[in-house]
């Protein structure tokens, strides 16, 4: 069955200029993102991973090339590369969600308000939005007693889980995650990755940049960047649990996935 393309980058290039020196971070890159996929972007430091994420999501503009979204109720794709800053902001509000390594929560707002304010930028239906926020906060195991706490009163893991809820409150077409577990300890890393896997199992399309194999294993598709181009990609199939968990009923398949990804990354020089 052919997958549905929901985002297409064509001949994508990004160049940064520093005085007389130009740095070509992305070079005529072509990429399609498919509905329901958990796409992982990996590569060595400086390979262009975050630049690609920002260019795809509308957080930044490419120097050359196009980024086109294919959304419901639109006969033609929406090409965002030439959008004004204001129009890009509206587009991100309606179609993209974000989770970063730093959670960027507003310290003067409660956990609930951090989620609600993001949702209210799109919808004025406060009642329906509040119901969705409560449902999502429960889903990521933020206790009701903590909903009115400020971010500084929450643990790092709780803060990042609130940030995930904020990222999906508007039901984005794609959730973009840039090293979402990079600042977390091992247990909180596992918690956040489990949440992302659950969201993906429910149909949420995700594009995630990571530098760890533990996080990359959650994807069904891994793209490897080298010097601003896609050097290779690996199809892993659905995530079937931890390859180290002896109680995992899919342990052998999980071990096969891990071995396949590890070999792929070794060939790429990771």
Image: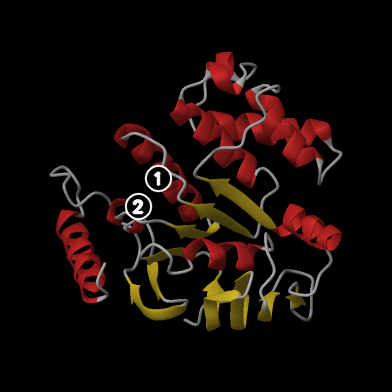
Identify the residue at image location x=28%, y=56%.
213
Instruction: Please state if 81 lies on the left or on the right of 189 as rendered.
Output: right
- Marker disc for residue 10: none
Relative image position of residue 111 (x, y in whole percent):
63, 25
**Figure check: 153 above or below 17:** above
**Figure check: 8 above or below 270:** below
Relative image position of residue 101 (x, y in whole percent):
49, 44
Would you call the spot at circle 1 few (<14 residues within 10 Å), some (14-19), or many (20 or more)? some
Identify the residue at image location x=66%, y=33%.
133
Asked if one can make out residue 202 in the rendered structure from this viewpoint, the answer is: no
SS at badge 2: helix
Identify the residue at image location x=75%, y=52%.
93
Q: Do the residues labelled 1 and 2 touch (CB within 8 Å)?
A: yes
Q: Mark 1 points at which residue?
A: 193
Q: Quadrant of residue 246?
A: top left
Instruction: Please state if 83 lies on the left or on the right of 202 as rendered.
Output: right
Relative image position of residue 163 (x, y in whole percent):
57, 37
Foreground of the two, 18 or 108: 18
Instruction: Please state if 103 lies on the left or on the right of 263 as rendered.
Output: right
Q: Quarter of the image containing the C terminus?
A: bottom left
Identify the residue at image location x=22%, y=76%.
267
SS at badge 1: helix
Relative image position of residue 17 (x, y in whole percent):
63, 71
Foreground of the two, 143 or 55: 55
Foreground of the two, 252 or 8: 8
Q: Pick out the residue farthest to the front.
A: 20
Asked if one can make out residue 252 in the rendered structure from this viewpoint, the answer is: yes
Q: In 3D space, how far apart are the residues under numbered discs 1 and 2 (Cα atoms)?
A: 7 Å
Would you call the spot at circle 2 few (<14 residues within 10 Å), some (14-19), or many (20 or more)? many
Dot 1 or dot 2: first in sequence order is 1
**Figure check: 10 above or below 191:** below
Q: Mark 2 points at which residue?
A: 215
């Amino acid at each position: 069955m052919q997958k549905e393309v929901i985002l297409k980058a064509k001949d994508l290039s990004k160049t940064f200029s520093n005085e007389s020196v130009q740095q070509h971070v992305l070079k005529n890159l072509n990429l399609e993102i498919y509905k329901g996929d958990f796409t992982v972007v990996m590569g060595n430091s400086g390979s262009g991973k975050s630049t690609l994420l920002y260019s795809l999501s509308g957080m930044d503009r490419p120097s050359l090339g196009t980024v086109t979204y294919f959304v419901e109720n639109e006969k033609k794709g929406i090409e965002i590369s030439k959008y004004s800053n204001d129009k890009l902001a509206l587009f991100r509000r309606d179609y993209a969600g974000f989770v970063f390594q730093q959670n960027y929560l507003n310290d003067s707002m409660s956990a609930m308000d951090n989620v609600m304010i993001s949702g209210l930028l799109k919808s004025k239906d406060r009642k329906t939005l509040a119901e969705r926020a409560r449902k999502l906060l429960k889903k990521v195991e933020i206790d009701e007693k903590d909903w009115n706490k400020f971010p500084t009163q929450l643990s790092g893991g709780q803060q990042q889980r609130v940030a995930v809820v904020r990222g999906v409150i508007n039901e984005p077409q794609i959730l973009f995650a840039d090293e979402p577990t990079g600042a977390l300890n091992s247990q909180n890393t596992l918690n956040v990755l489990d949440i992302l896997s659950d969201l993906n199992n429910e149909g949420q399309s995700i594009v995630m940049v990571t530098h760890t194999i533990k996080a990359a294993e959650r994807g069904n598709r891994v793209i490897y960047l080298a010097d601003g181009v896609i050097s290779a990609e690996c199809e892993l199939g659905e995530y079937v649990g931890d390859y180290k968990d002896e109680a995992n009923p899919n342990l052998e398949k999980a071990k096969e996935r891990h071995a396949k990804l590890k070999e792929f990354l070794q060939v790429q020089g990771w």
